[in-house]
Amino acid sequence: MAGIYIHIPYCKQACSYCDFYFTTSLKSKPVFLNALLKEINLQKSFLNNAQVDTIYFGGGTPSMLTTVEISDIIASIRANFTVAKLPEITLEANPDNLNPEYLDGIKSAGVNRLSVGLQSFKDDELKELNRAHSSLQNTEVIKMAQAAGFNNISVDLIYGTPFSNEQEWDNYIDKVISLKVQHVSCYQLTVEEKTLLDNNIKKGITPAPDDERTEKQFLALIKKMKEAGFRHYEISNFGLPEFYSKHNSSYWKNVPYLGLGPSAHSYNGKSRFYNVANVHVYASAVEKEAGWITEEALSEKDLYNDLVLTGLRTEFGLDLPLVTAKLDQSFGNYFQRKAQPYIEKGEIIQLGYNYRLKEESFLFADRISADLFYI
């Protein structure tokens, strides 16, 4: 099994909190698309003929592409890779880009899973986040997608913002549940350097996120989603049975994947690869067939740290035999020694040779994992 990620670097406008690579100018789109199709061909041996089970259009805003452009990219991947008969093909989309004709078009192209960036159901908050859609559009596009025949829909929400209170957050969760989607991704607002949000907080225009409110909203989220039948299978992700994101799950299960497009990352089990985060430099380098990728060979310590970080993000946890099989027993012994204090505090649950975080401790997963790292 393997996955392919395509980074589409175009957005209508810049969200106040986003530090992903994007551009709001579409002038480079024809050059980008030509380079992307060429990169698909150049990278056709990267996965060593492994079957591609998932294709994921991320960004940026992939719904800025036309249905024909999406169809051409999928066709090129099918022509150059061994693609499963029924792969999971996800397209990230913003509500303001979706209409019935577009939804029919991407469905005909092969997209069978939608990830829609709702973020909030409060117009004032959407404005503060610099989103280009309204709360009414949020509801309309989900119903529209369902009417178009999409039965695998994920939506994104952001918690811990200074723009909504705990009751409003509860209402957002209730609203999403009432829309009968199959998957919900909820991300804690992170203040990234050099974003509009960061600048506004530093200038005193916007209050900083409150840790206590963030934790309360996270715990409310866990409770409500569990009551609605969703499984909290990863820190930020809740899915109904059989509707986990297969693509994202491959990241957490140490499965090789290929990233295409500017700023995309790839992984082959031994090294990580980083595409240059500039559409013009990317396109020029791909045209010359050299210079758009940086390789980082992973040491044994790096591989161990990755296994810990990704394993403890999920409900499946970390299996110690996996660590010792990929590395050696000394790394297993190191993990057990470092994990013992967290086991005694009840933050890590040990079942035989499997270790997983207590669900309430997911909020602190990065801190706990970092303490277990091999430095």
Image (spheres, helix red, strand yellow):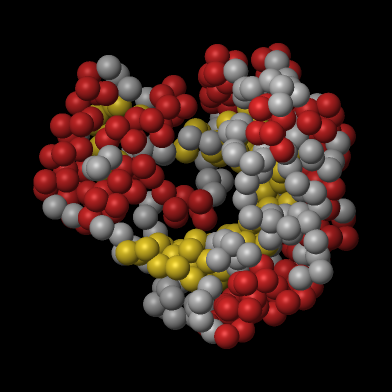
Quadrant that contains the C terminus: top left
**Which residue: 67% across, 48% down?**
115
For this view, does 88 lie left or right of residue 252?
right
Q: Position of residue 336 (x, y in %)?
A: 17, 34
Residue sitting nearer the eye, 29 or 323: 29
On the question of residue 67 being in view, the answer is no
Counting every numbered tag in the picture gives 0
Residue sitting nearer the eye, 336 or 249: 336
Q: Examine the rendered structure and indicate whether residue 265 appears above or below residue 20.
A: below
**Which residue: 70% across, 16% down?**
165
Q: Position of residue 110 (x, y in %)?
A: 68, 67
**Which residue: 71% across, 75% down?**
33
**Which residue: 54% across, 84% down?**
289
Quadrant that contains the N terminus: bottom left
On the question of residue 296 being in view, the answer is yes
Q: Examine the rendered structure and indicate whether residue 232 appears above or below residue 206.
A: below
- Residue at the extreme front: 203
For this view, does 52 lie left or right of residue 201?
left
Q: Position of residue 201 (x, y in %)?
A: 68, 27
For this view, does 43 lie left or right of residue 252?
right
Q: Position of residue 246 (x, y in %)?
A: 51, 53
Location of residue 70 (image quadrant):
bottom right
